[in-house]
């Protein structure tokens, strides 16, 4: 009797622990939406989402510049990071010898482990001066942030793509070779297309990381809350908007920042949903 | 590259080969440049002053921040590991196939792992700091980070548990042990290296975290005297130094210490990973 009671009790404990993540997600949703939605309706959802002016001192809150800023840097990061990442993943999966792999693998793990604040610092003291010299601007701006984020998403892209390429059956590669294709052609014309859902998942994870990155971006993007007019101009993302002003914001200003977080959260939820759908599709294909 | 003749008449293949090699070289080069530059500029700035027990505006010591980092890391693990491991045990050992709850748990875990740290920071601020009235405190930071690393611990533990061969469980049942005894005496012990790998990844995330901590644990410079007082971790310390803009030399030194921590964490993690792989083989 005692034993079976213990069994039942512990099973309940395990079950409750397993519900922790559900409770966490519910709490996060309740507190984010509960605080953000009232602010949005007070400002007016349309005004909030499409307003191009962010002037907390005049109680004008439009976050379109930040949405555009976030999209610009994310697209920039993808343009820079994805090709390099996929080529590098192909190198690791199909081109390099064991010796090179032994160097590359820990290098990429280390890239993944470096704190974002250190990336931001490196961007500030190295990339910003270089951009300043080349373009004669302040050096801070969308392009600088895109380069930095492109580097930061590399480990994610490489690791996920590499395992996707490795998961393709060997026979695809051999078949292509047998048809007279070169090694390169076999990898890029058969293996990579066959691994496309895994690689797409890698890119989506990269998008999630780039759009959510905060401090590294805040140091090198310039942080002007204006509509960016070129890739060299300063901008502000949704994430940096929150972190820059949360410290001193009160009242409706603070709520507007939380609402910015809600918009970002909505973006992330959509990205997550896409990721899940693609993963499910690739699981069904197997 | 010595087989250049093999690419004769195949310019496309040669171009691809060059792109592939260049990309791999570029990736390593970026890492070397980053680590090299920070070590080169930072090591000369490492003075004993930076490691004094108390922070003053003269010595800008990072010691209190290091101590806070250790406290916050330890306590976050203390919260997240039991929850993470127990949920993984439920998912792998108890939940039946096609269980609806399992689907929900997976969905929420994946959602959690996709949420960026600034959202965790905002949530931690709204919930722990404001709604629960903890004000800026390392406890608020600990709880926020614990939620943040929960999916990581869950996923790695789940994989570790799945890797335990069913014969172990059958053997244990065959000897008359109950389910609970089997889980604690047979399954979990053999999954320890895998769980440890997840814990180390979690440590790495906590040490590098900034955005989730600024508005939960706050940015007070001293050692947090209790769980309800504010204190900054090393990453937050570095952020504060940079945003004050007066302490570039100290920021370089802090970056060196952070990098060294990350390198050590990575080394331990690859050691553990090797052990896991060795066991599986």
Image: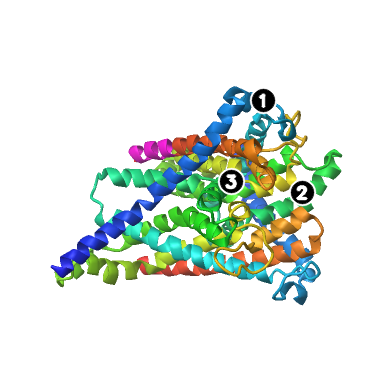
Label located before the other in sequence (2 or 3): 3
Above or below: residue A252 compared with residue B24: above
Q: Which residue is mark 2?
A: A127
Is disc 2 in contact with disc 3, using a CB cutoff of under 8 Å?
no
Who is closer to the viewer here, A4 or B273? A4
Label located before the other in sequence (2 or 1): 1
Label located before the other in sequence (1 or 3): 1
Q: In this picture, which residue range is highlighted in magenta?
A: A276-285
Q: What residue sits 67% from the left and 40% below the top?
A: A241
x and y percentages locating residue B59 in the rendered image: 78, 71
Q: Give the mark toward the camera: 1 or 3.
A: 1
x and y percentages locating residue B211 in the rendered image: 61, 51
Q: Which residue is mark 1?
A: A51
Q: Secondary structure at mark 2?
A: helix
Q: What residue sits 55% from the left and 42% below the top?
A: A208
Chain for numbered disc 2: A
Who is closer to the viewer here, A47 or A169? A47
| Side of B234 where B138 appears, left or right | left
The quadrant in which residue A222 appears is: top right
């Amino acid at each position: 009797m005692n034993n079976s009671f213990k069994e039942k009790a512990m099973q309940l404990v395990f079950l409750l622990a397993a519900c922790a993540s559900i409770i966490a997600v519910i709490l996060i949703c309740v507190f984010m939406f509960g605080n953000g939605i009232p602010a949005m309706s007070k400002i007016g959802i349309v005004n909030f989402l499409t307003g191009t002016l962010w002037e907390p001192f005049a109680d004008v809150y439009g976050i379109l510049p930040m949405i555009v800023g976030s999209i610009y840097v994310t697209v920039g990061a993808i343009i820079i990071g994805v090709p390099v990442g996929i080529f590098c993943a192909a190198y690791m999966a199909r081109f390099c010898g064991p010796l090179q792999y032994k160097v590359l693998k820990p290098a990429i793990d280390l890239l993944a482990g470096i704190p974002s604040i250190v990336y931001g610092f490196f961007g500030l003291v190295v990339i910003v001066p270089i951009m300043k010299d080349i373009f004669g601007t302040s050096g801070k701006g969308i392009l600088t942030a895109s380069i930095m984020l492109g580097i930061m998403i590399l480990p994610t892209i490489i690791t996920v793509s590499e395992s996707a390429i490795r998961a393709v059956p060997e026979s695809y590669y051999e078949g292509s070779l047998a048809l007279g294709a070169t090694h390169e052609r076999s990898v890029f014309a058969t293996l990579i297309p066959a691994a496309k859902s895994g690689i797409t998942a890698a890119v989506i994870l990269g998008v999630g990381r780039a759009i959510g990155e905060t401090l590294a971006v805040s140091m090198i993007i310039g942080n002007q809350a204006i509509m960016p007019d070129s890739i060299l101009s300063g901008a502000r993302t949704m994430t940096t908007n929150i972190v820059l002003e949360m410290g001193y914001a009160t009242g409706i200003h603070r709520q507007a920042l939380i609402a910015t977080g809600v918009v970002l959260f909505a973006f992330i939820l959509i990205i997550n949903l896409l990721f899940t759908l693609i993963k499910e599709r690739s699981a069904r294909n197997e | 590259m010595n087989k250049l003749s093999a690419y004769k008449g195949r310019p496309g293949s040669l171009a691809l080969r060059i792109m592939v090699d260049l990309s791999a070289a570029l990736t390593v080069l970026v890492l070397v440049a980053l680590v090299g530059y920070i070590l080169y500029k930072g090591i000369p700035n490492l003075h004993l002053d930076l490691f004094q027990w108390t922070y003053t505006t003269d010595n800008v010591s990072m010691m209190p921040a290091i101590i806070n980092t250790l406290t916050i890391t330890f306590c976050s693990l203390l919260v997240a590991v039991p929850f993470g491991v127990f949920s993984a045990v439920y998912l792998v050992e108890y939940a039946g196939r096609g269980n609806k709850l399992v689907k929900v748990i997976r969905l929420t875990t994946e959602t959690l792992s996709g949420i960026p740290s600034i959202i965790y920071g905002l949530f931690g601020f709204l919930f722990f700091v404001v709604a629960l009235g903890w004000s800026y405190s390392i406890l608020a930071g600990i709880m926020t980070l614990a939620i943040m690393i929960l999916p990581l611990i869950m996923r790695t533990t789940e994989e570790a548990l799945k890797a335990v061969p069913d014969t172990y469980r059958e053997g244990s049942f065959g000897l008359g042990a109950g389910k609970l005894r089997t889980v604690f005496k047979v399954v979990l012990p053999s999954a320890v290296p895998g769980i440890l790998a997840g814990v180390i990844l979690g440590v790495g995330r906590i040490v590098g975290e900034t955005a989730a901590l600024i508005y939960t644990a706050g940015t007070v410079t001293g050692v947090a005297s209790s769980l309800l007082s504010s204190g900054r971790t090393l990453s937050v310390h570095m952020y504060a130094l940079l945003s004050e803009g007066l302490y570039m030399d100290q920021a370089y030194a802090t970056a060196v210490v952070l990098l060294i921590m990350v390198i050590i964490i990575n080394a331990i993690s690859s050691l553990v990973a090797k052990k896991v792989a060795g066991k599986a083989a």
